[in-house]
Amino acid sequence: MIPPAVPAALDPLVAAFLTDRDGVRAALRRYGSPLHLVFPQIFTANLAALRAVLDVGAIRHRICYAHKVNRSAAFVRTAAHAGIAVDVASVGELRSAQAAGFPADRIEVTGPKGATALRAALGAAATVNVDNLWELATLADLAPAETIVPVLLRVSGFSGSSPSRFGIDLTEVATALELLVRHRNRLRLLGFAFHLDTAATAERVNAVGDCLELIERAYAHGLAPTVLDIGGGLRQVFTADADGYDAYDRALRAGLLGSGPAMHWGNNTFGYHVAEAKVHGGPVFHKYANTESAADILAALLAAPLPGHGGRALGAVLTDNLLELWLEPGKALVDHAGITVAQVEFVKQAGTGATLVHLDLSRDTVTAADQEVLIDPIVLAEVAEPRPAGVYFAGHLCLERDLITQRQVRVARLPSPGDPVIFPNTAAYHTDLSAAQAAMHPTPAKVAVLHHEGRFVLCPDADYRPGGR
């Protein structure tokens, strides 16, 4: 049986680039394989879509690009050029943001921070999104005389939300406010922040309601917060065919049950578990099922009624209270703005009869180790006639676990050695989160792609300058 197809949603710019097969091969010859390609113009378009939603509601806002989503210099320079802010989660990212041209008042330092990171944040005069009480007290101790550090309090522990290891629990906010009052000559509270590990509108609305109450409590302490930071977590759209995704999921589960052809390698169950002749649980690839754009998710959140405010929309409540909304999108800004290209090394038959297509990259190059790629890679094969087949893509590490796809993938035709294989939409965490140099394989090059005057121009990511500067 040939598995159902799960085609990727491609930005028109990426689709146009891939139609030039000679151009793709030329890029591999010039920069080597495997290769990460980033498209800053798509980043700019994604940013414009989010800005349009916020502008419709006339909401005071700040968009902070979450640098951790990708190490690309082209992306962070594009963000700086666009005039937005940046969210950095390490000293290295802070240095990268400064090199890209972000001024101090457009840099926010987030995540858990030790003394070294806090000193770097202070040295940069950046806003500090405080994760815990120790950070808050240490900031007050480390801040130079006559320096007032702008801070946000990241809070967690909302009812109805999963427990989080990040942020100050709601039960500890009173202590945090006392610290801020005691050190008001060193620390200035800008507002409250949260980051939920979900895109569910109901949970976000609930968190916003709790944060508005915290703002009232801060006012009662003589503080004057004006910012509500709702973090990131806006989703991506991976697949061009939601029905195809569902068909594949059904076929995969049937294979796990033994009521259909097996489409899984070995004992991999993708997060499902089988019991009493049924498949239970949720898969590790659930994010690929999303069909809502980040802009639509944001619009729905801003339009959602806020409990306790007479049914008024969340966005209207923020505006009425003269609050500034901060967002920290990462995935949403690089959605569809990056692809990874590799070459086929050889094709073989395993002892099980499965067809393995070996590539010159590892699984960790295109996905986190505990996740599965559930959109089909694109094979630019030279053979013209279509001959659909089901294959597994294998990596180049001498490890059994280095199967790039541990599920059977539909290809239009079997590739040959040297054929390019494209993994779409890899810019968000996929290329950098688990990247390693195992077995002394080099880290793939990263190259920016620009569409200019009807043609595509490529340059090393480190050399890219927005506006041709």
Image (cartoon, rainbow, N blue to C red):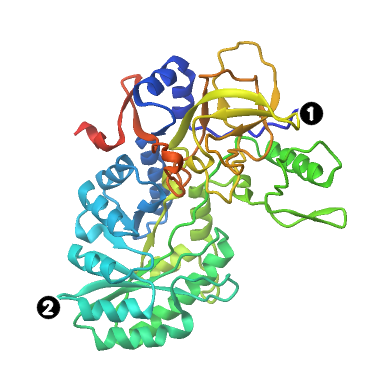
What crowding class fits label 1: few (fewer than 14 Cα within 10 Å), some (14-19), or many (20 or more)? few
Report the residue that reaches farthest toward the top. 384
C-alpha gap between disc 2 and disc 1: 72 Å
State which quadrant residue 435 falls in.
top left
Choose mark 2 or mark 1, whichever is in front.
Answer: 1
Which circle marks residue 146 in the picture?
2
Q: Position of residue 136 (x, y in %)?
A: 31, 78
Q: Is residue 166 above or below residue 379?
A: below
Residue for point 35% across, 60% down: 89
Residue for point 26% across, 35% down: 464
Q: Position of residue 125 (x, y in %)?
A: 19, 65
Q: Amino acid at mark 1?
A: Met
Q: Earlier in the sequence, mark 2 or mark 1?
A: 1
Closer to us: 83 or 147:
147
Q: Are marks 2 and 1 in contact (CB under 8 Å)?
A: no
Closer to us: 47 or 58:
47
Please name the residue that numbered disc 1 is placed on: 1
Q: Amino acid at mark 2?
A: Glu
Q: Is residue 274 above or below residue 256?
A: below
State which quadrant residue 183 falls in.
bottom left
Report the residue that reaches farthest toward the left. 146
Residue for point 39% across, 46% down: 70
Q: Where the N terminus falls, by quadrant? A: top right
Q: Is residue 94 above or below residue 114?
A: above
Q: Where the C terminus falls, by quadrant? A: top left
Which circle marks residue 334 in the picture?
none
Q: Secondary structure at mark 1?
A: loop
Residue for point 66% across, 40% down: 242
What crowding class fits label 2: few (fewer than 14 Cα within 10 Å), some (14-19), or many (20 or more)? few
